Image: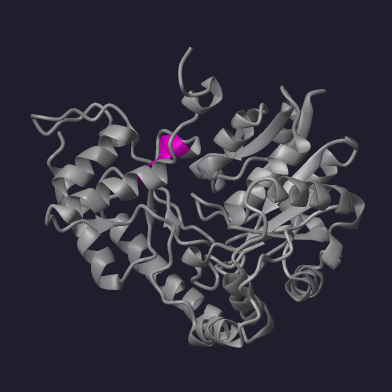
Amino acid sequence: MGLISQRIEAMEESATIAMAQKARDLKAEGIDVISLSLGEPDFKTPKHIQEAAKEAIDSGKYFAYPPVPGYPDLREAIAKKFTEENGIPTKAANVVVSTGAKQSLANIFMSILDPEDEVIVLSPYWVSYSDIIKVVGGVPVFVKGTIEDDFKASAEQIAKAITPKTKALIYSSPCNPTGSVFTHDELKEIANVILPYENILVIADEIYEHINFSGDHSSMGSFPELEGRVITVNGVAKGFAMTGWRIGYISAPEAIAKACSKIQGQSTSGANTIAQRATLAALTSSLEPTQKMADKYFERRQLVHDLLVEIPGLKVNMPKGAFYFFPEVTTYFGKSNGDVTINNADDLCMYLLADAHVSLVTGDAFGAPECIRLSYAASEEDLKEAINRIKVALAKLT
């Protein structure tokens, strides 16, 4: 009998975190590595949010355990945000605040899944969906979109994937890793497919909501016909440059919110008190700093696109949101520089880390082994240098 449980032995390490660690290790050796692997804003948390955290500390009021689902005034503010900004009718009782949106997702799947329950995962998908589903006994069922379709699976594909065991569907929009954005009409078509199946829930991951260049952020939770069947996940990491503050939150049917709070009470309890107060400031003040960050991402998107399309063999589309490109790289499979042969996207990422000193993430981790993910949440100087290094390194492969 092994020391580690079979379910944990079967779990994959997060590819994004693993690649970021490899980059850190090389940097520690003095190698000039440009890291484009983590989905982490390169901006600082806006000053007024920092000040709110300082004020919370100075007040002396927030040093004790907080309520497990979050402070009441923060939950009220989140409910107001969902209701007014997203058109999702939400009360404080529907809200649970967690230590990042990743914990929110873990809470959700632990709350709703029994062994062998199936979850339709629109692919390419965020790296952790699959393993969270599997570790709680569920079965991910992948429905894949291609680069020709802007990486968006269709309602028809989803309809074919539904079985008597289907318990939920999960998608992200804007999407990590592809940057794709589902339009209102596309979500409506998916909703129409799900509607007749009263026991199927929808989990909408909207963490990149504010980094959307399409002008059309739509929430499935706003569709009245799916009332009581949609769980919306969000947080402050991306839109407010608060990754390290670790605050995520959900709007969910009250029974599911209570279940998530119950699980959280037996694991981490309430999220960090000072981070909650900072989050309250983020959600109740001007979005101008967020918009300025999004505007800068918009500029970088064009820059990176123009540089990537100049590299022979890369198949590149223009993402509508988030801060990633997800080029198809199969042209390079089977090629070699004389010492290393590129058999797949994993090999290509390791080659580019070793030869170009640029860290990227294999698309295999996101359900698309023909692609690699590049984050443009970096300075223009680093992006230009990194893509030039990639271009030089790829030219060595024949």
Residue with the most extreme left position: 338
Q: How is the image coloured?
A: one colour
Residue 188 in sight in this render? no
Q: Is residue 211 left or right of residue 41?
A: right
Q: Is residue 102 left or right of residue 92?
A: left
Q: Nearer the viewer, residue 390 or 8?
A: 8
Residue 369, image x, y percentages: 42, 33
Which stretch is magenta? 361-365
Residue 221, image x, y percentages: 80, 57
Q: How many marks?
A: 0
**Residue at position x 75%, y 73% from top?**
81
Q: Is residue 243 left or right of residue 168?
A: left
Q: Quadrant of residue 365?
A: top left
Q: Nearer the viewer, residue 276 or 182?
A: 276
Main SS, magenta region, reads: helix
Q: Is residue 173 magenta?
A: no
Q: Is residue 164 left or right of residue 121?
A: right
**Residue at position x 67%, y 60% from top?**
270
Residue 311, image x, y percentages: 25, 51
Q: Is residue 363 magenta?
A: yes
**Residue at position x 65%, y 86% from top?**
285
Position of the C terminus, as image quadrant, is top left
Residue with the most extreme top position: 1
